[in-house]
Structure formats: structure tokens, C-alpha cells
Amino acid sequence: MSAAAEILVPGKAGEGEALVLTAPISFWGGVDPRTGRIADVRHPQHGEVIAGRVLFLPGTIGSSSASAVLMELVHNGRAPAALVLHEPDAILLLGLIVAREMGWETPIAVRLGRGAFEAYRGGAVSVGADGAVTVAV
Amino acid sequence: MSLSLSPEEQAIAARQDGAGMAMRIVAESARLLGAPRLIPIASAHIDGALYHGDSGTLFAEKLVEGGAKVAVRSTLNVGALDLMGCSRIRLEEPQRGMARRMMEAYRKLGCEQSWTCAPYQAGHRPALGSDVAWGESNAVVFCNSVLGGRTNRYGDFLDIACAITGRAPDYGLHRPDNRRARLVFDVSGLSPSFLASEIAWPVLGSLYGRQVGNAIGVVTGVAGHPGEDALKAFGAAAASSGAVGLFHIAGVTPEAPDAPTILAGPEPEAVIRVTPEMVGKARAGLSTAAAVKTIDAVAIGSPHLSNAEFDSLERFIAGRRLAVPIYACTGRHALALLEQDGRRKRLEASGVVIVADTCVVVTPIMPELGNGVLMTNSGKFAHYAPGNTGYAVLYASLADCVESAVLGRPVFTDVAA
């Protein structure tokens, strides 16, 4: 199974176990910037770790410091392997843009409708440099 | 529509220095936002100098190394340290050193050492209709709503990048059509005595933010101007409970001489008629502590206290000794007046802890208690204190906060909505 997704921010192609979030998340206060663990106790995926995963985001909410948290995750080596967003979030993705300006290796971020997310749940997923989101059978 | 940059902007973006890096950040954001062009800005308020981790410090230092300087007036929001030395910050090394390096880097970029979340009360007041790039949610909503300056909610990195380039993406609240109200928030069903009370505005702000989310509304049914500190409290509470960047109050704020003028269409998309029951629920929702017999502290000053608010604090304390501390957060702009005539020393002798340049929810100041109870008159502190400090919160008016601090137990005066 493979879908061609629009590239939002180019970056390193990535592969990892899919982590499909079932509710929007606020990175600031919602994700621990040192570990990549989802710290928001009210979030359905509380306790999961986003580091090294292909992260499927149905939506993002909250603070304008989300970019700082994502950049800190990149700097600490705890960023997702790739980000798949239902819609572009300029504040969150700014974290990748600035990290890239710092000369750090950043994961690719692509856009894919959230209706397609379920097909990837639990799978080993790769996101290619061309934006192809593929699940290994 | 795709982004088009001027030849000058393209030339700057091609450079390898700090200004080039800032221009690429602004342009990439504009592309993601779908903005067709960049527009010039008159000023910036920078929220990016609060330490969240080492990467933010390294970013600011890279801009400094690249010779970048802000191109427009740029004030700074709070940092993680009290540089005035009023209060003791429990931030340990190496974080403390990195936070200090970050604050120093923003100074070297040419930002004003304002260190306040209320820059609009520290002499930074954009003109009506001017485009600016401001960060910090309460400052953004005040600038848009009370002053009529035009800004979106600029977050970390983009705020300083806009300040260095003197430009911002042309989208959102920079465009007059996007500033019109679609909802009416009618408070005419509330009693005049409640609307005149201090707690009315933070409570209504909290309710407003939850009701409208990120939509733009106009508040109707307000008889007279409630005062600048009331609008400050309303906006701060609304921007914490919802994604509010702009509100209007008919007959009060500059873009809304009356409701029809500011509404987007002949009829609003929805009318929220505020009832006393809704207000009661919103007020109760600001507290997280159940019935408690004692409190451990009071925190006020989110947004930072004005001199008028310090006057009220002094009047309510009336020379008495506090049983639990009142943490009074403010900016150095207010401190100057407070230092005169020994006022600050008198307040501190009563048991007030003045916190300057920062505040109790963004950096560790209050002692770590397992189950501490904090009383506050700030809708914003009420929202963030439980998550950021571990204290449960009780919401009350400033007068009740002071009485409770004197007695060490919560006291409430009822004001019927």
C-alpha cells in the first residue's frame, strides 16, 4: 500500500513504526521535548513516544511554542522519523524549517488526508524523499 | 496563489548571513501559510527569548554570529530569569546559563530590554491600522483589539525573523476583511453591578474564549469603557481558553464604534446571549481546588501588573502583614515608579514577593509543594498554573486574594452575575 503525498517541508526520508494519533495535539505542554513522550494526560495516545516513529497528525492545537518543541526534539535526536499531517501547520513546521537552517538533519513532512491514516496503523511505514508514504506488507 | 518575493527580498534570502537566514524563515512560513507576498511591519514584540531548551539559545546565537540586527522597534517578552534581582529563580545549571545566554543574544540583536508580557503598558503602542509582528497571546490580542494594530499570533523564531527582515507574511489579521466579527457575544443580560466588578472581565474573557474558539466576535451590551486593565484581563483570559487573536467591544474598542459597523455581514452567524448561569459556570471553572481550608500563596500579574494595579494592591493590603506570600509579577517599566517613596520596600515588608522580567508560571519560583493551593485573580494564571506549577488554583477578585493572603485561608465575596 502506497500513497503519493504532497511534500510540505523537504527532509530526510524516514521509516519507522506508524504512530497514528486519534486526536489533535499541542506540542507545547503535550510532548516532552527531551524524550519525545506524549505527556498530555488527556491525550488518547498519552505515554507513547513519537521519537523514531512515522507520526500521523490529524490536527494540531495550542501554543505558538510548538515550533520550539519540535526543533528541540530534532536537536535532542528525539524527532519522529517522518511527519504526516492532515493539513499544513505553519507554526509546528517552522520548527523543521529553523532546524534545517541550523544545519541539523530534519525529517521530511508531508500532507495526506486523515481519511487515509487508518491503513497505516500498526504498520512499518516509510516516507520517501519523493513524498511516497508506503507500508511494508 | 504562490508566494512572490521582490528582487530585494530574493537577494537577502540568498545571503549566507543572519539576515539571509531570517528572510528564508519568513519566506518559508509565508509559503506554508499561503501568503502571496510579504508586507513591511512597523514593530515587533518578541516572545522567543523564553528558554525552552538549548536549541532556541543556539538559534539566537547563530543570528548574532551572522551579524543580524532587528530592523524595527522590537520589545522583549518575559525571559526565564529575574534580571532585576527582585525574586529568586530556582532554575539550576546548566539550564540557567543557557537561559542567560539566550536573553543576552536577543539583547545583541538590538531588542529592547523590556522583558514584559504587557509591552503596551511599557510605552510600545502600535498606531491604529499599522502592521506589526507580535508574539505572546495576551499582547497579540491587546494589540489587535484595544490598539487596532494588526498582527497575527507570531510564535517562536518567526517573531525575531520578522523583526530582522522588517517584514511579515501578508495573511490573516493583517487583512482588513479578516478582522470583521462573525459572532455577537451579548452581555446585556448580566447585572450592572457584576459588569462593574473586577472579576467580570477575566471571567467573561475565559467564557468568551471557550465559546468562540478562533472566531472573531463583537461583545455587545457594555455600557461604558471598563478601563484598560479590564480589557487586558479579558484578552489574556480569552487567549488562554481559546485561540482568540482579536475581539471587538461595541462602543469601546477602536474598530467597533457599534456592532453593525464591524460585523462581516448584515446578520451575525451566531449570537451568544450570556446568562448569569453561564458566568457562574465559567467562574467556577477557573478554580481547580475543591473545598480547601488553607492556601499556600497568591499569584497576581498575568499579564504583568500596571502601576494602577499596584495602587489597588497597596490599598487592599493597607499596611497589614500577610500570612502567605503574594507573588506580584510585573515588568521593569512598573518597577521604576514602585521604587519611589519606598513603596516597593513597604510591599515587601508586608510579605509581597515582587517578580520582575518573568513570572511564576514560566519559570520555577514558588516552592515545589506536593499539593499546594494558589489563589489568583488572573484568568491566565488560573488556566496555566495547575499544569506548569503543580498548584491547584482558586480564582477570586484581587480584594479577596489579599484578604485570603492576610488570613492564610480562602475568603470569597459573592457578586451575583
Image: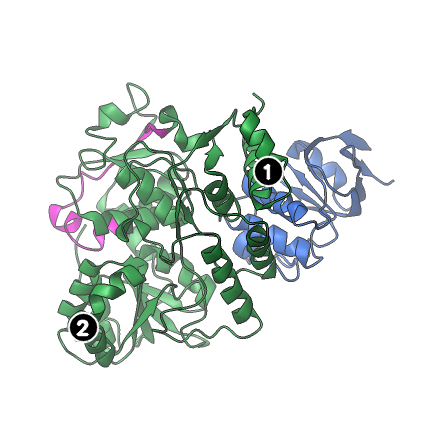
Chain colours: A blue, B green
Q: CA distance from mark 1 to mark 2?
A: 48 Å
Q: Nearer the viewer, residue B402 or B272?
A: B402
Q: Mark 2 — on which chain does it sit? A: B
What element does badge 1 sit on? helix
Q: Does residue B146 show up?
A: yes
Q: Is residue B127 above or below residue B282?
A: above
Q: Residue B99 versus residue B234: which sits nearer the camera? A: B99
Q: Identify residue for label 2.
A: B343
Residue placed at 64% from the left, 62% from the top? A34
Quarter of the image holding residue B178? top left
Report crowding for label 1: few under 14, some 14 to 19, many 20 or more residues within 10 A (C-alpha). many
**Chain at numbered mark 1:** B
- Which residue, given by chain and number where applicable, does mark 1 sit on? B24
Q: Looking at the picture, which amino acid does disc 1 mark?
A: Arg
In the depicted view, which residue is nearer to us: B10 or B321? Answer: B10
Residue B283 in the image, given as x and y percentages of width and height: 29, 54
Residue B406, above or below B382: below
* Image coordinates for residue B83, horizontal then vertical, percent: 40, 68
Residue range (magenta):
B179-202
